[in-house]
Structures are given as C-alpha cells and as structure tokens.
Amino acid sequence: MRDRKEARRQAEELVSRMTLEEKASQLKYDAPAIPRLGIPAYNWWNEVLHGVARAGTATVFPQAIGLAAMFDEEMQEEIASVISEEARAKYNGQSAHGDRDIYKGLTVWSPNINIFRDPRWGRGHETYGEDPYLTTRLGVRFIRGLQGDGKYLKTAACSKHFAVHSGPEALRHHFDAKASKKDMFETYLPAFEATVKDAGVESVMGAYNRVNGEPACGSRTLLKEILRGKWGFQGHVVSDCWAIADFHTHHMVTATAPESAALAMENGCDLNCGNVYLHLLEALKEGLVSEEQITEACTRLMTTRVLLGLFDENCEYNRIPVTACDTDEHDALALRAAEKSMVLLKNDGTLPLSPEKVKTIAVIGPNADSVPALEGNYNGTSSRYITFLKGIRDYAAQHGIRVLYSLGCHLFKDRTSGLAQADDRLAEAEMYAEIADVTIACVGLDAGLEGEEGDTGNEYFSGDKQDLLIPESQRKLLAHLERKAKKLVTVVAAGSSLNVPEGNACIFAWYPGQAGGKALARILFGEVNPSGRLPLTFYHDISELPDFEDYRMKNRTYRYFEGTPLYPFGFGLSYTRFETVRASLDGDTVKMVIRNAGDRAGETVAQVYVRCDSPLAPLHPRLCGFRRLRLEAGEEKEITVKLDPLTWTVVDEDGERREATGGTLYAGLYQPDELSVRLTGLKPIEIRK
C-alpha cells in the first residue's frame, strides 16, 4: 500500500531543489516542465464523472444521477475502477507521444458530491441525488475505485465542490450561500467528511460561491478549520476554474489579483485552476504571502505526483496498454449499469411488451435518435452509441416487428423558430401512432437544457430549469399522442425531477450512457426487469418548494418536504412483486428476509430508514442503510444491511453530533410504509467521532 509519509519525504527533497520561481510555477493547473530536475509538464485538469471525458474515445457510463439510481455500492466501485483503467491507458499512450495537455492527466476532478437540494439546479445530474447517506456511500466507493488499492494511486480522485454549492448557476460567481451549522453538518458536509476519512480522497475542489460570507476557495472556516483541522485532510486543495478571480471581480472581498491569490493561499488552496496564481510572486513582494506558504503548496502537489508513481518508471500501472480502453467488457458493464439505473414510474400492465402480440411499434420524439440524450455532461465520446431508436429497432428486427419512426417535434422551440417549423412533424407522429400497436414517446431534456452555466445552450436560465415541465413543443406532442395512440409508453431522458405526462407506462431513463438504447429495449420487452430507484424526490410543481436561493433545508428533499410528492425518494416499480418477510437488528446491521412473490426474476433494493427519538431529528425518517439483491421467481433470501455509523445521531443547532437515546428503524423496500418492518427501542451503535 502507498506510504504518504515516504511520498511526502520524496516531494520535500524534490521541492528543496527548486527555485522560488519554479515552485510558484507549479501551483497553476497547467504546470510547466522543469527540465533540469527531470520534471515533465503536467496538466492537472481531467474529468471522469461517468467515464473518461473530453479526451477521445472512451466508455460512456450512465450520468452520475443514473449511477445513483442503481443504489449499488459494489457496482459503483467496479465502474470507477474501469474508468481509472481507461484513464491510465490513455495517459500511458498519450504521454508516450508527448501529449500532456488538458484532460490527459491522472488527477481526475470527480466525483461531484454536492447535495441536489433543488430540482431547478442544472448541474444536479452530475451528483448522486438529494440524500447525504446515499451520496456518502456512492462517493466513497467511486473514489476507492478510482484510486485503487495498489502501491501507487491508480488515479487521484477529487471531491467537489466544497461546499454548500447547488445553484443558481447564473449567480454562482457572486452568490453567498447561507446555511446554518445544523444544515451544514447534517446535510451539506457529511459526504465530504466521509470521502476524506473513509476513502482517503487525494484532493478537494472548492466552490465558486461564498459560504456564509467567505469565498469557498479561500474560506478559513471550510479549508483550515474543518477540512484540515477537524478532519485532518492531508491531500491538496484545488480551486474551481477561475473561481479565485471571482474574489476581486464578483465577490468583491479583495481589491486586486495579488490579494485574491494571497487569500486563497493563506487558507490552504494549493492549486489554481485559472491564472490568478501568476500573481503569487507579486503578492510575495507585497508581503501578502510567504515563501513558506508557496513551498508547502508545491510540496503537497508534488506529493500527489509521487503517490501517482509519476516519477517511477516501474509504477505498476505503467503497463496498462491503450487497448484497455473501449473494450467489449467495458461496454457490457455500461449496459448492465444502464439496465439497473432506469426507473419504472408507472405501468398499467402495458409493460413488458410481448413480441408475439406486438407487431408494429411507433418510436416518436426528439430524444428517440439522440446521442446527447444518452450522454449527459462531462462526458466522453463512445464508439458504440445505441440510441433509443436503434436499440428498439435492433430488438424488433429479431422478432419480425415493424418500427415506424418520427421526430415528432424539436427538443425545444427557440424564439427564432416559426410555428410551422415547430409543428411540422405532428401529423407524421399522429399517423404512425394511430396504426402502431404501441407508441414509445422518447422525450425529456439533454445537457443543452440542463447543465453548467457557460456550458449550455440555455441562454435564459444559465443551465438551470425554471420549472418541472418538459419544453412546450414536447408537451404538445404528447397531448396529440395521448389522443391517437392505442398504447402509449413515455420514456424520459433527463437528469432531474420532472412532471411529465406518462401515458400507460413511464420509464425514467436518465442519461443512460452509450448502451442506453439496448438497455431500454431489453426492459421494454421484459428481457430485463426494471430495478432503478429514484435518488430524488419528484414534485408536482415548483410552487411546492422554497425560493431557489434559500439554502435552508426546511421543506426540501424527502427528509424535510412538507407536502405529498409526485414520486418519493427511493421509489421504483418492477415487473414482479417483492415482499419483506421479516427483519431484525443485529448490532450495526439489520437482517432482512426478502421474497420474490411474483413470477419473474428481478432485482430490488432493501432500504432501511431511521427516526431518532429527538426533537433535533429531521421531519421524516432518513435513509441509513440499503442493499441491492437479485431473486429468482418465488425465491426467498436473507441479507444483512449495514447501518450508517451515524444512524443513532442527530445534529444540534451548533452543528454538533449527539447520540440519540433510541428510535425506530423501518426495514423494507421503500420509504417507511405499512409494509415496512418496524424495529424500536434500540441501543445506539458506535458513532464516528
């Protein structure tokens, strides 16, 4: 296993031979070479959110929110391990050919473990949803998969964006997110703490916004007191890109670039994604920073490079060949992930389709033959895309089923398009729907409609959504199809909570990656039993929620929502019927017996929730354990579900965790309901100190 102390010693020796100017030069993301010391140029900026991104051909897995919908820790780590394998393969090949440019390194700025607190946030599909515990477990396992368990780091993962960051995108460069200490330590910070303490994440990225008055990338509270002080973080901190420039251009907490560089450096931001650290030597002359601070930041960064084995020609990962990227095995894993991620929201018996009974299918909609509907954002480029249309057509061809296709409408009607252009495919869609046995309407969004500010085509809301509706052009299309189709199945590609007309059945497909179309076809025809679960609460309307800029958790997410959701967190239907037979507590685990009482094999997710006996507890029971399992028709199986170490704790108004005297566990397959097994009068388990 890697030895941080020894890596630090090697880094200190290397840095001791650098000039002051050389040390300062290494604190910018595109660090230049130092030939006299044998240090090659290195670009720290790479992205692997759901596959190696922006660097050529790579396996594209479901977007992060789709990975969350799997509720599968083991597969999460397996996927991350494959991603790091491909990142190493690319690094080995590209660096051998002298390409050390952006997106080619081994410091990967993933995962995004912010809490998806409001469905309007455009970047929410980069996260693992709204729940701190689910986000914690998936973040920890993703990081373990990325970093590996060898002598060296396979890649160096990054937890971002630290912290209290979830929109609005249009305001992020000057916004001050105000959160109470209770909300900080109960909701916004637990996943970051776990990735530091339990996963050993190598880096942490700051956020653009201020947090309670302090810019996140220069926050004494976040970076010094909590991250390094309270949690003992030993890795390096990187700014979000050009976030330090916001200090003096938007937040107005400093007056000049040297002052901004000094504020970030003083509070422990080691690496600048941007160019403000070009002013570090000027800040030094002005007495705003010290050479010791520059030396320490450079030492931390060189420690990471040593831990990656970048100065060891015998590093165990150097032998990974370029042929390890984009393999058949990785494609098969992407297919399994897509199948596990899709959520069946509604079904009146229309699904699964029978190849013997269905002879004509109409596939209609702007996302039917769309590659962007598969990709999400921060994505790679696959050589194997299977759109929804192609997946259905390929399956249908094997069974003699005719497929009719129509675009139906454009993804959205922009302000320059005329009415004729917007509606020019409605008649075609109607005539196909009238004669088809089943109509599959592929609607929703893509990363051009929900995404990051400055990285999206949505000029009105900077990547955020203004409501929970799909664009008007698609609502009009669905209204026509509902009148004409014999049976209507709605397939929604999106990364956030939406309220969409559902037809006879509805599948929420997220952005399912390169194999999304094949996965959808296998689910539609019953080759695969749907098993995804919602990592988000689906609301009826945005009017049910507080103001987007309000970071208080009151009336947000399933833990605090005061209304009745459209679909609850953890929800997802199946083609079979699962039952919780019995459950019991055994130390820090819950033993559960689950039965498949239906006539089809399938997978389900055991879910355990807790309500502590304390006025400090959230409004509703919170998730504290989950486990995915597969059961054959009629099979009964006993499993154990490990409880969150924080299960029997609550957070007070000062942000301190306190042990609860007891409470109630709800063991079942969804949020607590009449079928959940209740376990009460429990003794607290040991908590993380």
Image (cartoon, rainbow, N blue to C red):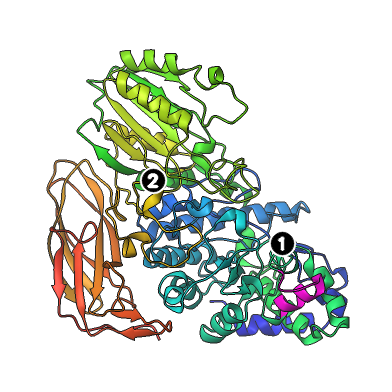
Say if the magenta span includes residue 261: yes
User: What residue would you read off at disc 2?
Assistant: 336
Q: Nearer the viewer, residue 541 or 436?
A: 541
Question: Is residue 504 toward the left or the right of residue 193 in the image?
Answer: left
**Amino acid found under the numbered disc labelled 1:** Trp
* Residue occupying image coordinates x 51% and y 16%: 424
**Tag 1 residue:** 242
Estimate the x, y position of residue 113 in percent, counting from the top left: 49, 63
Which is more toward the observer, 585 or 467? 467
Q: Nearer the viewer, residue 320 or 442?
A: 442
Mark earlier in primary sequence (1, 2)? 1
**Residue 45 location (% of width, % of height):** 68, 59
The residues colored magenta run: 252-265
Relative to 245, residue 579 above or below:
above
Q: Amino acid at mark 2?
A: Arg
Q: Secondary structure at mark 1?
A: loop
